Amino acid sequence: MNDSDDDDLSFDPRSWDIGRPTAPPVPSPRSTPQSPSFDPRSWGKSDPRPAPEQQPTSPTPPSPAPAHAFPKAVAQLGPAILAGVAIASGGAVWAMLDRQPAAGPQSVAATTASASPTAVAASRRILTVAGADAIGPSLVAAGVDATEANDAATRARGPLGAGSDDVRLVFDIESGHLVHLDATREDGAGIALARGAGGFTQQILSAHLVQRLTIVRGELDARDFYSAAVAAGINDTLVSDFANAFAFDFDLQREVAPGDIFEAGFEQRYNAAGNPVGVPVLVYASLETAAKSRALYRFTPPGQKDAPGQKDAPGQKGPAGPKWYDANGRSTVRTLMRTPIDGARISSPFGMREHPVLGFMKLHRGTDFAAPTGTPIFASGDAVVEFAGLKGPNGNFVKLRHDNGWETLYLHMNRILPGIIVGARVVQGRQIGEVGTTGRSTGPHLHYEVHIDGQPTDPLALQMGKSSETLTGAALKAFDALRDRVDARRSAAN
């Protein structure tokens, strides 16, 4: 094969909540003013001057001041004396009014203990650490006794599980001892420890999550689908999933235009504090253009597994793959995907063109998708590998023969994935290689061809075959329930 083409180059903080009470400073009765005057307006304000040093008590009385100094001193200290008398009198009256009845022996003991200079109130601290393994060292660094910190960390490691997900610690310390600890993950699951007579008592905390379905609707603008989707309220992590849902129905490069209407429904889990947990999951997607419209629902048939938040691959199949169905329960999957690459732009369509390297008119036998080097390339349908390797101007090249006899070709790859060898069986949506610029190429891109009965065909104009699956029986009943729930939420949102 002599095909070659070109393309322009595409391309916690830790928070501390100390609960320790702080007693107000008590002035020394032996302190003496260092200034001959006192301004009552400064009461309660900090004095920037250093505190006076206390003088030792002397048995020798001080020498009397000269008689002529008294009138001046009285004049200067008069306002201060009056203010001091007034404050002292007010304090005495308040103390009498606030006096409580005499307490019994237990109350007196409690009062005496709290007034003791050696009593230390528990302080509360809040930390976020990177995983359960960081609990022990973090508690020690916060002042907890090492033995208690390690004991608490060991108890918490089981309920929290392994991994590096953040763990929130809320704990109380008293004199270096751990009084209470809550260690929880983002979803609220974890453990609560409390000091008891014989050591720590513990309570396992279960995750408390609620799931909400959000519907957003928007209109394509003149820029691109990504900006319009994000502006409408679609989480940016869902944009490629939305595009992949229509892998068999729309060419989002050429078949959409400004003014086209799109709608998306996604589910998100929230913890008890109302914060989102995990990644959102797209469950509904619709697109309405001037030529056609499609509304699709994501559904996993009974007995199959679909992990929440799993990244959608175009046309992915198999027990763990997401499934998209129309309102009648008919699968969107066709014999071939329209585009075997995610998030690329069409840089050169099928048809006659002047070859960018050779310089003469030549049939461009496929479609070029410009994308950065390393972008995944997927098998567009179930097939057997007929060729995989380096081939002249084609560079790294893979040729697949599909079950209906059609062939697809993938050129200029950066690399071919291990396991993609002649005779190997691949399923639709499996990654077979990465975008590159090997062979006769002017920039990183995928050159993609579809051959029917040996003749190259425009893949974007091709009807990609019939649906491969239609739900029946219990699976259809479960799908209808999901579809009705989504539609009810759509009606409420609109």
Image (tube, rainbow, N blue to C red):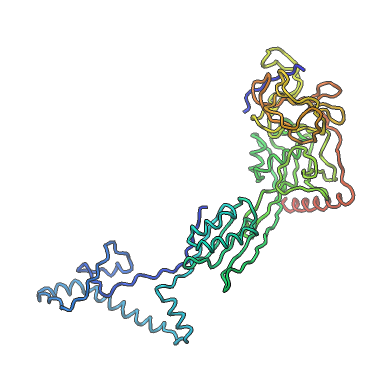
Tell me residue 252's x, y (percent).
Answer: 72, 34
Q: Residue at x 67, y 45 (%)?
A: 234
Furthest residue in direction right, as rendered: 473
Is 83 drawn above or below residue 266 in the view shown?
Answer: below
Residue sitting at 67 percent across and 62 percent down? 206
Report the number of numbered marks: 0
Q: Quadrant of the N terminus?
A: top right
Towards the viewer: 129 or 338: 129
Q: Residue furthest top?
A: 360
Task: Give above or below for 358 relative to 80.
Answer: above
Residue shown at the point (47%, 80%) measured from the top left: 110
In the drawing, does residue 207 fall left or right of residue 50?
Answer: right
Which of 118 and 92 lies nearest the eye of the viewer? 118
Residue placed furthest toward the front: 147
| Residue situated in front as seen by the camera: 434 or 194 | 194
Is 487 on the left-hand or right-hand side of 201?
right
Q: Position of residue 223 (x, y in %)?
A: 64, 34
Using the rendered view, name the quadrant where residue 330 is placed.
Answer: top right
Against 157, residue 121 (above or below) is: below
Residue 150 at what x, y percent from top left?
55, 60
- Residue nearest the viewer, comparing 475 with 297: 475
Give the quarter of the image for residue 56. bottom left
